[in-house]
Structure formats: C-alpha cells, structure tokens
Image (cartoon, helix red, strand yellow):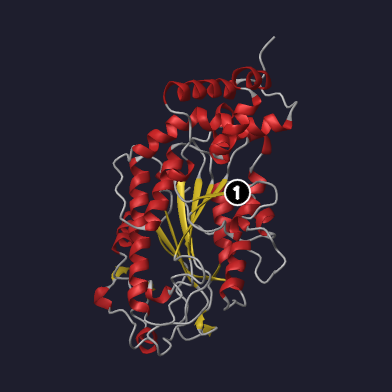
Amino acid sequence: MSQTRRDFLKSALGASTLLSLAPTAPVFLARTALAGAERKSEGDTALVLIELSGGNDGLNTVVPYADDAYARSRPTIRLPEKSLHKIGTDLGLHPRMEAFQRLYQEGHLSIVQGVGYPNPEGDHFAAMRNWHTARPHDTTCQTGWAGRAIDRATQPEQGKAVGLFVGPGSRPLALNSEKVPVLALRSLDQWKLRALPGDKGDAYRNQLGQLAGLRRQRENPLLDFVERTTAGAYADSRKLDAIAQDAGGAEYPPYQLAERLRTISQLLRADCGVRIFFTELGGDGFGGFDNHANQIGNHCALLEQLARSVAAFVADLKRQNLLDRVLVATFSEFGRTVSENGRRGTDHGAAAPMFLAGGRLKGGLVGEHPSLTDLANNGLKFRTDFRRVYATLLDRWLGFDSKAVLGGGFEPLELLKG
C-alpha cells in the first residue's frame, strides 16, 4: 500500500511537531512549492503595478513645452525646454527622468497620454477607490479589479499565490478579492524560513521534501492545512535562499522602490507563479506626490526614483531573459491642476499619463496630449479611459477576461507587439 501524506505526517514528524513548525513557513511560499509539478509557468506573463501615491503632476512629468499655455499657467514651476529629455516633436520628459528616455529610445517604454475617466473625483480616497475597483463612483464595491482577476484565474486546489503586494502598509484595495487570499510582504527577508540549524534542520527539510511528493489524501482538514502551509516552503527554501544571495549581476539604485522591484525580480526568477505584483511609490496617507506647495524639489526626487528604479528592474529582467514575460504599469489617482496655485505647487486635477515598461511593447506615445485650456476640475480632460488600459493588460497581456473583471466592454489599446 502506498504511503499517503497523512501517514507520512504522523510517522515522520508527528502532528504536534508539524503544527509547531507551521507558523514559521510563509503560506505564499508553501502554496507555491506545493503547486510544483502541476504548474508550468515558464510561459506565463506577469504584471507589476506601481501606484504613484498622492496624485502625480503629469504636466511636469511629460512636459508639453511647445504649448504656450504651459509657460503661462506655471510662471514659477515650469520646466525649461533645454532641461528636458525630448520625446517626439513637442514633448519632453522631466530632467530627472533620463533613465526613462533611454528606455523610450530602446522601445521598452510606452506613455499613454491623458488617462482618466468621466466626471473625475478630486478627493484622494474617492479617486483612489475608482482606480482600484475600476468601478468609478460605485462606493459599494469592495473588491479590486486585480483581485477579481485573481479570483477568476486561481484554482483553489492548485495552491498558487497569483497576486502579491510588495511594500509597507496594508494590502491595497486593488488586490481585494472574494475567494483567494492575496498576501503582502516587505522583502524576501520577511519570508526566510526559520528551520532548525545543522543536520537536524537538514533532516526536517528532507522529510518535508518527501512529503511534498506524496499523494494527497484529504481526510483531515487540519493536517491538510498544515501540509499546504509548511511542507512545500521547506522543500523549496534552498532555491529561494540561493536566489536571494545571487544578485545575478543586477545593480539597483539605493531607493525603496528599487529594493521592492529587486524583491519582485527575485520572485520572478524563482518562478513562484505570481501573475500580478503591486507596489507603490510615495508612501501612505495622501502620498508624496501630493505637492500643494514647494513642488519642485520633492517631485524631482520622486520621479528620479521612479525612472532609475524601473530602468534597473528592466535591465535586471533583460539579464535574466525575463523581460518579454513582464510588464510594468504605473498609475496615480489623479493628475494636478494646469495652473500653479500661488504656493509653488499644484492642486488636485484630473487626467495624467501612464507609463508602461517591458520587452513586448510597441513603445512610444499612445494617444494625444490633452488640451491645456479645455479643462476638467482645472485639470486635463481625459483622452483615454483608464479601463481601456486595464482591458489591454487583462485581455492581451495576462489572458484574463476583461469584460468579466471590469463589468463591461472596454476596447483594448494597441500597446503590444503581435
């Protein structure tokens, strides 16, 4: 008679011993490893979402320097044409975004101009809710658009973690799901396995490795839970430790966002099965992009961190032959007002650009830049509904059903190579 996982648990480790080990093993890694032989994710694509918290000033990010209305509206915070990194004939990237200009020239960066939605909200939390749920003005929705996608993409018996938040604070609304838990971590260090040292620890690892290969028998829900949250994690821990110690030649700048993207790169290299990663730049609360006063210095620092961190991530993925499988997308809850406010800052506006980076993008500018005189909420009117971008990411990148996730049909954009 073949040995079951339940028999092995009892004979090799004892239920009480395994229960004592369970809290030390990350659920995420355990489920990932237990998916093991059943999952072949080598061809799976992954999406990395970066939220620019606080409302990014799109006009000083992708600058319409050739439009006279730009200089008239911003007498003290306008950016001189000669300082910009030119893209196209009448636009330039912020002076600190040289790294994005390089990606743009390489064809690895797309800029979707004037992204927003009808009747834009000027309140941080209402606007964030709209972007996170993809159900604008529906205050009853409790799930995020990415969370709904994760629910539809995940088979519970596979034990895969399809979504993951990387960063401080609580999991964002965008990842709220109904069926599948979506986890959060700050870094790989948080998930290191606390195994016993020396030969005894190796013995436990070997036993748990055997456990991961035994046939499953669901007689005892408690033991089944323990096996899912413990066995695979120990069996696969050496691989993750090796990846964490081997930088693979990658060089990242000394920024928080860069470290989070490094963590995501390591998880991608480990082939953990995550399809949607979420992280943020700008911090908790209203966010660092909410620059109502003295905008120039803080905005410079944040945009440099964004551009250099994403460029390092792209270079790392390229080195690991993963760039064609990964797409980065940035978003912010709103843009800023066209006119500065008298305090060398800007107030809450409406539409703003989205950046996408990856190996299978067509690259370049997408859509037309909005008018600087025909405004909404004193900000830019949207030219592209953000749900069209989401539909592109869902249908054409992740292979999910955007109509089911978004609750309606939105025409995808022509962002990706065939």
Q: Is residue 170 left or right of residue 355?
A: right
Residue of label 1? 182
Query: How many neighbours does mark 1 have within 10 angstroms: few (below 14), some (14-19), or many (20 or more)?
Result: many
Using the image, determine if residue 129 lies above or below residue 404.
Answer: below
Q: Where is residue 162, by image quadrant?
A: top right
Question: Is there any visible trace of residue 358 in the rendered image?
Answer: no
Left/right placement of residue 266 relative to residue 410 reads left
Side of 356 relative to 30 (left or right) = left
Position of the N terminus, as image quadrant, is top right
Q: Nearer the viewer, residue 96 or 293?
A: 293
- Within the image, what quadrant is residue 405 found in? bottom right
Residue 397 percent location from the top left of the image: 53, 49
Q: Position of residue 377 (x, y in %)?
A: 55, 83
Q: In the displayed structure, would residue 166 be above or below residue 156? A: below
Please tell me how many numbered marks the rendered image carries: 1
Q: Residue furthest right?
A: 219
Name the residue located 54 percent from the left edge and 60 percent from the top edge.
389
Residue in view at x 53 percent, y 77 percent:
350
Of residues 331 and 238, the one nearer the viewer is 238
Residue 303 locus on image (x, y percent): 36, 67
Q: Callout 1, which amino acid? A: Val
Looking at the rendered structure, the secondary structure element under dot 1 is loop
Q: Give x and y (percent) for residue 126.
A: 61, 72
The residue sitting at 30% across, 60% down in the picture is 99
